[in-house]
Every structure is written in C-alpha cells, then in structure tokens.
Amino acid sequence: MKTLFANVDVGRKNMVFGVILFLLIGVLAGIPLTIDFLGGSLLASDQYQMWKVVHGYGVFLAFINYFLGTTIDRLDVPNSHKEIVSWSFLVAGVIGGAGRMILVLMSSLDVFGMVASLAETMLFVLGTIVFVRGQIQEKASRRSESTSQAQHYSRAR
C-alpha cells in the first residue's frame, strides 16, 4: 500500500474514492448487467438501459478521480490550487457517480437528475479552470525566469 501512495499527498483521497466508486458501480452494478448480457433477465429493458448508463458513467468518473489522484501531486502548482482541483473532482464524482446511482435506486432521477448534472458540471468546470489557470501561470513564470536569466547571461558576456 505504501508504494501505491508513494509521493501522493493531495491526490490520495481521489485515488481511494476512485477505487471505491469502481468497486461499487463497476463491479456491484456490473454484475446484474453481465448476467442480463449472458441471457438471464434480472432487469427489465428500461432498467437495463438506465443501469448501463449509470454503470459506464460511474466507471468513467472512477477512472478520472483515480488518475487525477496519481498525477495531481506531480504538478508544479500551489497546494491551494491542487486542493481545489482535487476536492471539486471528488465531489463531482460523488454527485455524478454515487449520487446518480442513489437517484436511480430511489426512482428520483427524473426529478433531481438535472440538479445533480448541473452541480456536477459546475464542479468539473471549476476544477478544470483552476487546473488550467495554474498551468498557464506556471508556464508564464518559467518563461519570465528563463528570459531574465538569458538577459543576465547576455549582459555578463
């Protein structure tokens, strides 16, 4: 376990959440889908289609969170930016993965699905904006450093 979380501080929660979400939605929700695929009929046709979407989307969010967790600490941006990105993607995964699954189980997806999608999208946009902004600022500071060093070396000659 130590090697899995080696050099991971901020992204640890995303990695753990990604694995848990994959086990819940990827495996737990995937079992009835696989049985139905092999000829057994545990779900009605509409239920099967809805669970296929929830399953696929949940696995997608699990992978996004896991791989964000593995890479976020390697970036050269301030920790505050990393935390905002990490938490926004994690909460978006909770809303979009676990929340959507709960809404389907409670037959409330039609009522609250739009609100969940809006909140999830806003969190992903927030995290992406902070992530990209941090990358742009870092590149700009590197350019200014390299430019000032080049000017310094040209004056020294």
Image (cartoon, rainbow, N blue to C red):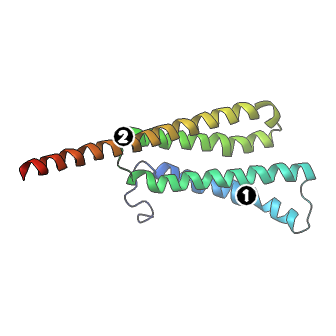
Quarter holding the N terminus? bottom left
Callout 1 crowding tier (Cα within 10 Å): few <14, some 14–19, many ≥20: few
Q: Marks 2 and 1, Cα distance to the nearest angstrom?
A: 42 Å
Mark 2 or 1: in front is 2
**Three-letter amino acid code of the residue under disc 1:** Leu
Q: Nearer the viewer, residue 83 or 19?
A: 83
**Which mark, residue 133?**
none
Q: Quadrant of residue 24?
A: bottom right
Residue 128 image offset from top left, x and y in percent: 52, 41
Residue 30 image offset from top left, x and y in percent: 76, 60
Left or right side of 111 for 44: right
Q: Quadrant of residue 52?
A: bottom right
CB contact under 8 Å: marks 2 and 1: no
Residue 146 image offset from top left, x and y in percent: 24, 49
**Which mark, residue 137?**
2
Q: Earlier in the sequence, mark 2 or mark 1?
A: 1
Note whether residue 44 is visible: no
Callout 2 crowding tier (Cα within 10 Å): few <14, some 14–19, many ≥20: few
Q: What residue appears at the point 85 percent right and 65 percent down from the top-left corner?
A: 35
Can you identify the residue that label 1 sits on? 28
